Image (cartoon, rainbow, N blue to C red):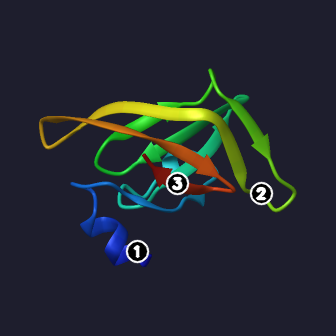
Amino acid sequence: MTRDEEIQNFGRSIQGPAQRIESFADLDDQRLSYWKDVGIWWLYLPGCGVGNLSSQQVTEHPNGTITVSPSILVTGHNKGQKVTRHGYLENSVWREV
Protein backbone atom coordinates (compact mmCIF):
# COMPACT_ATOMS: atom_id res chain seq x y z
CA MET A 1 0.00 0.00 0.00
CA THR A 2 1.42 3.37 -0.96
CA ARG A 3 1.42 6.38 1.35
CA ASP A 4 -1.31 8.03 -0.76
CA GLU A 5 -3.46 4.92 -0.45
CA GLU A 6 -2.91 4.90 3.33
CA ILE A 7 -4.04 8.54 3.58
CA GLN A 8 -7.17 7.92 1.48
CA ASN A 9 -8.25 5.01 3.69
CA PHE A 10 -8.51 6.80 7.04
CA GLY A 11 -12.29 6.87 6.96
CA ARG A 12 -12.31 3.11 6.44
CA SER A 13 -10.32 0.13 7.60
CA ILE A 14 -6.60 0.79 7.31
CA GLN A 15 -3.55 -1.41 7.08
CA GLY A 16 0.07 -1.04 6.17
CA PRO A 17 3.55 -0.40 7.48
CA ALA A 18 4.18 1.83 10.48
CA GLN A 19 7.31 3.95 10.60
CA ARG A 20 9.50 4.03 13.67
CA ILE A 21 10.26 7.55 14.84
CA GLU A 22 12.53 8.85 17.59
CA SER A 23 9.91 10.84 19.52
CA PHE A 24 6.47 12.46 19.39
CA ALA A 25 8.18 15.59 18.04
CA ASP A 26 9.00 13.64 14.84
CA LEU A 27 5.37 12.65 14.24
CA ASP A 28 3.94 13.07 10.74
CA ASP A 29 0.17 13.07 11.29
CA GLN A 30 -0.34 11.42 7.90
CA ARG A 31 1.66 8.27 8.76
CA LEU A 32 1.20 5.24 11.00
CA SER A 33 4.03 5.66 13.50
CA TYR A 34 5.43 4.19 16.70
CA TRP A 35 8.12 5.21 19.18
CA LYS A 36 9.44 4.54 22.66
CA ASP A 37 9.56 7.28 25.28
CA VAL A 38 10.82 6.78 28.85
CA GLY A 39 10.38 3.01 28.53
CA ILE A 40 6.81 3.18 27.14
CA TRP A 41 5.91 2.30 23.56
CA TRP A 42 3.39 4.51 21.72
CA LEU A 43 1.43 4.06 18.48
CA TYR A 44 -0.07 6.80 16.33
CA LEU A 45 -2.96 5.91 14.01
CA PRO A 46 -3.81 8.74 11.59
CA GLY A 47 -7.40 9.81 11.78
CA CYS A 48 -7.69 8.37 15.29
CA GLY A 49 -4.87 9.39 17.60
CA VAL A 50 -2.16 8.13 19.92
CA GLY A 51 -2.29 4.90 21.90
CA ASN A 52 -0.13 3.98 24.88
CA LEU A 53 1.04 0.36 24.58
CA SER A 54 1.96 -0.08 28.25
CA SER A 55 -0.73 -2.74 28.82
CA GLN A 56 0.46 -4.82 25.85
CA GLN A 57 3.47 -7.05 25.41
CA VAL A 58 5.84 -5.41 22.92
CA THR A 59 8.58 -7.48 21.30
CA GLU A 60 11.33 -5.50 19.62
CA HIS A 61 12.98 -7.39 16.78
CA PRO A 62 16.68 -7.06 15.79
CA ASN A 63 15.71 -5.04 12.69
CA GLY A 64 13.96 -2.39 14.83
CA THR A 65 10.40 -3.47 14.07
CA ILE A 66 7.98 -4.39 16.86
CA THR A 67 5.20 -6.88 17.39
CA VAL A 68 2.47 -6.08 19.92
CA SER A 69 0.13 -8.54 21.61
CA PRO A 70 -2.65 -8.88 22.31
CA SER A 71 -4.56 -6.77 19.77
CA ILE A 72 -4.61 -2.99 20.09
CA LEU A 73 -7.76 -0.89 20.60
CA VAL A 74 -7.45 2.88 20.19
CA THR A 75 -10.35 5.29 20.63
CA GLY A 76 -9.79 8.83 19.43
CA HIS A 77 -11.31 11.46 17.20
CA ASN A 78 -11.13 12.77 13.65
CA LYS A 79 -12.67 16.13 12.76
CA GLY A 80 -14.89 16.00 15.85
CA GLN A 81 -16.12 12.45 15.23
CA LYS A 82 -15.34 9.56 17.58
CA VAL A 83 -13.14 6.96 15.89
CA THR A 84 -12.21 3.51 17.15
CA ARG A 85 -9.46 1.40 15.60
CA HIS A 86 -8.83 -2.23 16.50
CA GLY A 87 -6.01 -4.26 15.04
CA TYR A 88 -2.63 -5.90 15.29
CA LEU A 89 0.89 -4.57 14.88
CA GLU A 90 3.12 -7.39 13.65
CA ASN A 91 6.68 -6.64 12.56
CA SER A 92 5.58 -2.98 12.46
CA VAL A 93 2.76 -3.67 9.98
CA TRP A 94 -0.73 -2.61 11.09
CA ARG A 95 -3.57 -4.98 10.26
CA GLU A 96 -7.02 -3.79 11.22
CA VAL A 97 -9.76 -6.22 12.20
The residue where tag 3 is placed is 94
Which kind of residue does numbered mark 1 sit on? Answer: Arg
Q: Which residue is mark 1?
A: 3
**Residue at left 36%, top 55%?**
29
Which secondary structure, mark 3? Answer: strand
Drawn side of residue 22 relative to residue 24, left or right: right
Marks 1/3: CA distance? 13 Å
Q: Quick check: can you spot residue 8?
A: yes
Please provide percent x and percent y for residue 41: 64, 35
Q: Which numbered circle lies on residue 64?
A: 2
Residue depicted at x 28% and y 49%: 47
43 relative to 84 in the view: left or right: right
Q: How busy is the neighbourhood of tag 1: few (under 14 within 10 Å), some, or many (20 plus)?
A: few
Mark 1 or mark 3: whose residue is earlier in sequence: 1
Task: Report the residue at 70% width, 29% height from top.
Answer: 38
- Count residues near mark 2 (Cα–Cα under 10 Å), then give few for <14, some for 14-19, many for 20+: few
The residues bearing labels 1 and 2 have C-alpha atoms spaced at a distance of 20 Å
Residue 34: x and y in percent read: 57, 48
15 vs 55: above or below: below
Amino acid residing under circle 2: Gly
Q: Earlier in the sequence, mark 3 or mark 2?
A: 2
